[in-house]
Image: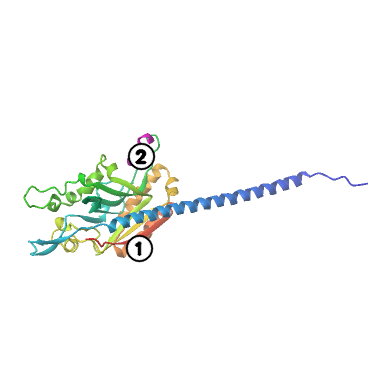
Amino acid sequence: MMRQQQGWTLIEVMVSTSILVLLMVMMAEALSTTQRSWLTSRTTAAAQQELDYAAGVISRQLQQATLQTRPGYDGALNQTVPESDLHFVCGPSAELLPALPGACGDAVFFQRPMQDGSLTQVLQCSGFFVQYGGDEAWRPTFSSAIPVQRRFRLLQFHQPASGLTLFQPSGVAGGPPLQAQMTSRTDLYGWFSQPLGNSASYPGCVSVVAENVVAMFAQNTPTSLRCYDTRRQQWEPGSTDAISSRHQLPGMVEVTLVMTDESGWARLSVERAVALAEQLQNFVKGQSWLPSAMPQSLDAVKQMLMSNGMSVRIVVLNVAMGGQ
């Protein structure tokens, strides 16, 4: 007589179910890990692409900077000196844009003529700086119900020549234009600081190059000048620095961009993000950015950001300033 087949015991069912659940958990964890890795790789690639794009924009624009110098004569020095109607200035944002909230690191601004079809010698004013703030200036009107996104941004300044009064005549026959007569840094930097400091003109003269670039630093040759101003002789006449930079572009500009990830800022509450942004701005101001201290200062900024859960990317580009 054949033995009757028995069914599953309760213990066997529980063991089988546990194994099945364990396998499902392991599969879910593997899928989750794969998904996180894919998202991380995608985010990293997107951030690197944006950083490369920002570096390309700055490099192309700076390479086109020119002063179009000509021989001039300085009666006080009794010698021939280079002269130019244009302006190039590069230095700490705290000096160039002291009234602009949220600025971090360095900034660069320059004027140059631009060929445009049948129009020649069209003046273009351009510049780059980093600022922490909201996105109200670039949002369409129908998005007012969406919360403001506060981020660090690499911004480009651009202003049409029609908005300038720098080249108006001084009123004296044969006299120099207004820009050449200014002896105050505040007045001399007014062509970019005033439109940037005016809430009405700000949206029209600023565009976003890249999000989450938290700082930009610029080193010049000669490296002794943290603020390289081709019109320095107008507010610091006779100084060695003024003589060396008078209407002469630096030989090279080394631009360093520090970028964080979007996910790091998105994880923070509004209050924490604002506090971290202010902490970072003060931290950057407290570091030395002379060439000898640059590696240590960059590492300190990187460590400070990483300790707050941010991933950090740094790109350095060297731009030869050939046009005069």
- Quarter location, residue 72: bottom left
Q: Amino acid at mark 2?
A: Arg
Residue 43 lies, in percent from the top left, at 46, 51
Of callouts 1 and 2, the N-terminal one = 2
Q: Is residue 140 magenta?
A: yes
Q: Nearer the viewer, residue 153 or 103?
A: 153
Q: Badge 1: few (under 14), some or many (20 or more) residues near its Cα, within 10 Å? A: few
Q: What residue sits right under mark 1 in the picture?
A: 295
Is 182 positioned to the left or the right of 204 in the image?
left
Residue plotted at (26% across, 45% down): 196
Q: Residues within 10 Å of mark 2 (few under 14, many from 20)?
A: few
Q: Is 125 covered by the magenta stretch?
A: no
Q: Amino acid at mark 1?
A: Pro
Residue under the point 38% across and 50% down: 212
Range of the magenta residues? 136-143
Which of discs 1 and 2 lies nearer the camera? The answer is: 2
Q: Position of residue 146 (x, y in %)?
A: 40, 36
Residue pictured at 76% horizontal, 43% vertical: 10
The type of colouring in the image is rainbow
Viewer-side residue, 49 vs 304: 49
- Give the x, y percent position of residue 84: 16, 57
Q: Does the magenta stretch mainly form a helix, a strand or a loop?
A: helix
Q: Are marks 1 and 2 in contact (CB under 8 Å)?
A: no
Distance between the Cα atoms at labels 1 and 2? 37 Å
Residue 132 position (above or below residue 232)? above
Compared to 72, does 150 lie above or below?
above
Horizontally, residue 166 falls left or right of residue 158, namely: left
Label 2: which secondary element: loop
**Residue at image mark 2:** 139
Name the one closer to the observer, 294 or 62: 62
